[in-house]
Amino acid sequence: MISALSLLGTELSLIRATSFAESNPVEVSGRIVEVSLPASSSDDYRRIRLRLNRHTVISLGLSPKRLPAGSSAADVKLGATMTVRGVYSRGKAARNPGGFSEANWFRSEGISGKLTSVQVSELKPASASYRPLHYLYRLRLHALGLLENSFAPQTSALSSASSEFQLSSDGIMQALLMGHTGGMTAYTTKALSEAGAYHLLCVSGMHLMFFLLPFRKLSSWASMSFKGQRRLLSALVFFPALLSGFGHGISRASLLFLSASLDSRVKRRGDKINSLALAGSVLLFFQPFAIRQNGFWMSFLAAGSLKLMSPQAKSKLINDLISSLAVFLILMPLTAKQQQGANLLAPFANIVLIPLATYLTVVGFLILFLNLFFPFLSQQISMLAKLLTHSVLEIWLKLVSVIANCRKTFLCLPQLIFAAIAILWALVLIFLFRSGYFKVALFSLLISLLIPFLPMALQDDKKHLDIVFLDVGQGDATLII
């Protein structure tokens, strides 16, 4: 019911949002409802969302050079009101199949459009009630700076433009710990996506488990009581969510952890799926537009499938492989929709990539805490960080690169459909054989063997003309086959 109300409510909100003539300069006033972290802690450029009225939110970027006299990037805070002038656009559609559609992204986020060539004419500070949220933003920005200093990349002679086409460890630790991918190169982002490892950078329950693992071990070593351990973990559970800005995955995991901690108090064990549905309902209550976002669905589908499945193999490796394969198959439609295909090696690669990511995340949190509590030892901590993570990062990225470049195992959307049908047909045959319906199973097997020859029998000898339009951003081409 809450999902249906969220879908209906967000649609009505999008319809009622104020629209402007595209490519025309407009002047608007509103309140800042979100300030995104910059690509680096030293960057003064800010990407914000400005709420004009109840239903209208626009996105815009602010450069410190375009702020009023006497104002700086530090004044651009949540809750501040401003008057800006710029050119309005509803967002660009995808130029290529599988490409990024700015218009669809705006719609899923509840954004009406964006302003370019922005000029701020007035900026008023936020009220004191927003101060706790300002402290939170400063904490995230400070943590970003500490991670950048501790895991600074090796000096390179390549220009910043050339480095975008290189596989690099730049920004990986910030992405693992904070979900902040703005510091990664474009090539690294694409390689992680094609290798099926991008989910490791979306802070979720797995990261929460990595974060709490040392504290569990420490409390057990200190012989802490069960109540004391529960209080300690309940107090720490929101730290990864604070760092990542309360994304869908980590918010879901935090709510599930807190609901599970109530089991011992009420002397009853909560149902896994009902707990998951409760977490989803709470998230949709506070963020209705999440119902339109792939990240929300992928997070809850993956969590639900893992909770429903309980592989009973004796080997932990086999259980992990079965779980990874099942989640991969369940999420395949959403994955294929996002990148027009999927890599069949992804579930096998994650068996190795996830433990390496576990190590990097635990070490990353350790380095972050050392920086927070011992800032005067920043140089020594930076040396320790490089010593503990450099070789592991190199291995992790090398494996990602190898998997991403295996083009023969990357199936496009039509091929994935046939692969999914083949897998489902094989499962049906196995079920029929196990249930004792051997004649039906044999007949089905014969039909499945004849199906590949059907297109050959129906093949048309007529010539076909294919015209493909190629758009590479800087130029167009037409390929006639």
Image (cartoon, rainbow, N blue to C red):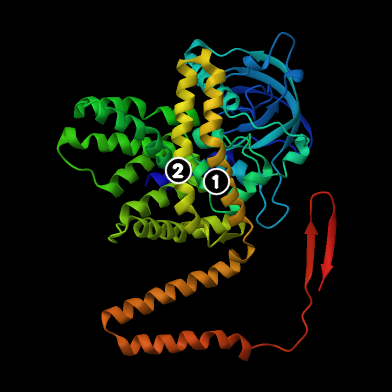
Badge 2 element: helix
Q: Is residue 245 visible?
A: no
Label 1 – label 2 distance at C-alpha: 39 Å
Identify which amino acid the numbered label 1 is placed on. Answer: Trp
Percent across and percent down for residue 374 are 47, 15
Q: What residue is shown at x 51% (from left), y 37% (from top)?
A: 176
Relative to 466, 275 lies left or right: left
Identify which amino acid the numbered label 2 is placed on. Answer: Ser
Q: Quadrant of residue 142?
A: top right
Q: Quadrant of residue 23?
A: top right
Instruction: Indicate which disc residue 91 carries.
Output: none
**Relative vertical location of residue 420 with respect to residue 401 in this rendering, above or below:** below
Pick the front one: 202 or 356: 356
Percent across and percent down for residue 42 are 66, 21
Callout 1: few (<14), some (14-19), or many (20+) C-alpha neighbours within 10 Å?
some
Q: Quadrant of residue 463?
A: bottom right
Percent across and percent down for residue 478 are 84, 64
Callout 2: few (<14), some (14-19), or many (20+) C-alpha neighbours within 10 Å?
many
**Relative vertical location of residue 344 with respect to residue 371 in this rendering, above or below:** below
Relative to 134, 406 lies left or right: right
**Residue at the extreme left of the image, as rendered:** 267
Q: What residue is shown at x 70% (from left), y 88% (from top)?
A: 460
Residue that label 2 marks = 6
Residue that label 1 marks = 396
**Relative vertical location of residue 432 with respect to residue 253 in this rendering, above or below:** below
Relative to 17, 365 lies left or right: left
Relative to 329, 198 lies left or right: right
Asked if the residues shown at circle 1 and circle 2 are in contact, with their CB atoms under 8 angstroms apart, the answer is no
Badge 1 element: helix
Which of discs 1 and 2 lies nearer the camera? The answer is 1
